[in-house]
Amino acid sequence: MNKKKIFSQQAIVINEMGMHARPAAKIAQIAMEAVGDIRLSNGSSVVDATSIIDILTLCAVKGSQILIKAESDDDRGLVEQIKAFFDNGFGELENE
């Protein structure tokens, strides 16, 4: 039996504006490079990370915890890239 190896990282939205269209588009762009599926979850909803609209439905405000999950270990680097994007406040912290 061949089991999928799932890789995940927990991220926190740290910028004041929360998740909005520009960071959602960047996350979707990164996720589109994946071999398998990358999903984002806020605990109550799980969405496709390649869909800007799906990402925005998470309504992730500052302080929201988001789980980034890849269903292929080949996508570990992409999950880490998305996590780093969260960690640097979507590149918006210097504007706050």
Image (cartoon, rainbow, N blue to C red):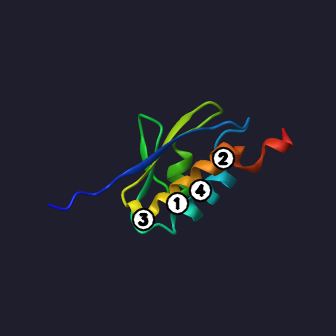
Q: Earlier in the sequence, mark 4 or mark 3?
A: 3
Q: Which residue is mark 3?
A: 74
Foreground disc of the pair 2, 4: 4
Q: Residue 94, how many percent across, how many down?
A: 84, 43
Q: Secondary structure at mark 3?
A: helix
Q: Mark 2: which secondary structure?
A: loop
Q: Farthest right residue?
A: 95
Q: Quadrant for the N terminus, please.
A: bottom left
Q: Residue furthest left?
A: 1
Report if the CB atoms under discs 2 and 1 are less than 8 Å apart.
no
Residue at 41% x, 51% y is 7
Return the mark for residue 77: 1
Percent from the top left, x then y, of residue 67?
Answer: 47, 42
Q: Amino acid at mark 4?
A: Gln
Residue denoted by label 4 = 81
Label 2 – label 3 distance at C-alpha: 28 Å
Relative depth, front residue between 33 and 45: 33
Q: Residues within 10 Å of mark 4 (few under 14, many from 20)?
A: some
Classify mark 4: helix, strand or loop: helix
Tag in front: 2 or 1: 1
Tag shown at residue 20: 2
Amino acid type for the residue under numbered disc 3: Asp
Query: Percent x, y for residue 61?
Result: 63, 34
Give the alpha-carbon distance from disc 3 to disc 1, as whole Å: 8 Å
Does the CB distance between marks 1 and 4 fall below 8 Å?
yes
User: Which marked residue is nearer to the observer: mark 2 or mark 3?
Assistant: 3
Q: CA distance from mark 4 to mark 3?
A: 13 Å
Disc 3 crowd rating (10 Å Cα; few below 14, some 14-19, many 20+) is some
Query: In the displayed structure, does residue 22 sit left or right of residue 58?
Result: right
Q: Residue at x 51, y 67 (%)?
A: 32
